[in-house]
Each structure stands twice: as C-alpha cells, then as structure tokens.
Image (spheres, grey):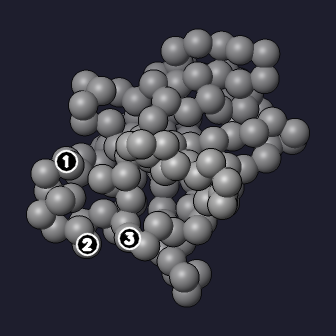
Amino acid sequence: MIEMALLTEAKETDNKVRWDADIDGTRFSLYIPKWRVPEPWPLKIRVTLSPRTQHRPSSLSPEVASQNPKSRLQPISAKLNKFQEHTKTIRYRPDRDASTWEIGEPYVPIPMTFDKAVSLMIDVTWVTKLGNK
C-alpha cells in the first residue's frame, strides 16, 4: 500500500483530480474523475495494487454519485489491464467500457507491477481530514 498526496499545483484537469507519489524516483500519478471524488477532496488517498484480479470491481455510476454524494465515499476497486510498456512505467487501462471507469489510465512504476503483470487490481481508499477511511 502507498499513500498518495493531492498536489496544490496542477492537481486537477477539467474532469479529473490528480494524486501523486514518488516511487523510487518515478512519479506515480493517479487521476480520478471528479464525479467519483468525495467533497471536500481528500488531501491523501491510499492505493493498493495486487496481482489478484478475482475480487469484484466497484461499480458506482456518475448518475448514482450525483444523486447520492455520500456514495462517493465508497472505496474504488478496479481491474487494470496492461496497455503499453515504457522505460520506467507500464500504462494500464481499467477493464470495462471507458464510460464506466472510476479511475483514469495510470502509468504504474514497474517495481509496483508484480513482474510486469498483464492484469492488476487497484484499490483506492479515501483518507479523511481525521486520518480515517
């Protein structure tokens, strides 16, 4: 598990919020659609990557998140599939149709990819102001 911080500079795009961590000198950035992030935006998130892809991904939709903002507090769990290998990172794509993705396409530092695994599970939990999930 790693803890990623919300940056004060360039922390958001038009549609996504970004958290960063430094993994052995390689930046790991995770973008999450704004509709999926609880408000106020958590300054930190906890991210776990696993080679075990059997557990069920979360499936919150933008419509449900809009109607019930507290539902955004639920952790995110997504299956990632290897898309493109780079020198220090591997770009993974969430499984399913892109319109249902709860995270962006992360460039995962190779030391975190379990020997360049074809598929990974990513779990994201929110760290609240009080340090609780």
Say which of 7 and 125 sits in front: 7
Query: Where does label 3 land, which residue?
Result: 39
Image check: 78 left or right of 17? left
Q: Nearer the viewer, mark 3 or mark 2?
A: 3
| Residue 42, position as x, y percentages in the image | 51, 69
Compared to residue 99, the image places residue 123 above or below, namely below
Query: Where does label 2 land, which residue?
Result: 70
Query: Where does label 1 land, which residue?
Result: 61
**Farthest bottom residue in view:** 130
**Which residue sits at x=30%, y=53%?**
35
Neighbours of disc 3 within 10 Å: few (<14), some (14-19), many (20+): few
The quarter holding residue 115 reads top right
**Which residue sits at x=30%, y=27%?**
98
| Residue 50, position as x, y percentages in the image | 56, 41
Name the amino acid, label 3: Glu
| Residue 92, position as x, y percentages in the image | 52, 25
Neighbours of disc 1 within 10 Å: few (<14), some (14-19), many (20+): some
Q: Going from the N terminus, do you reach mark 1 or mark 3 first?
A: 3
Image check: 13 left or right of 87? left
Q: Going from the N terminus, do you reach mark 3 or mark 2 first?
A: 3
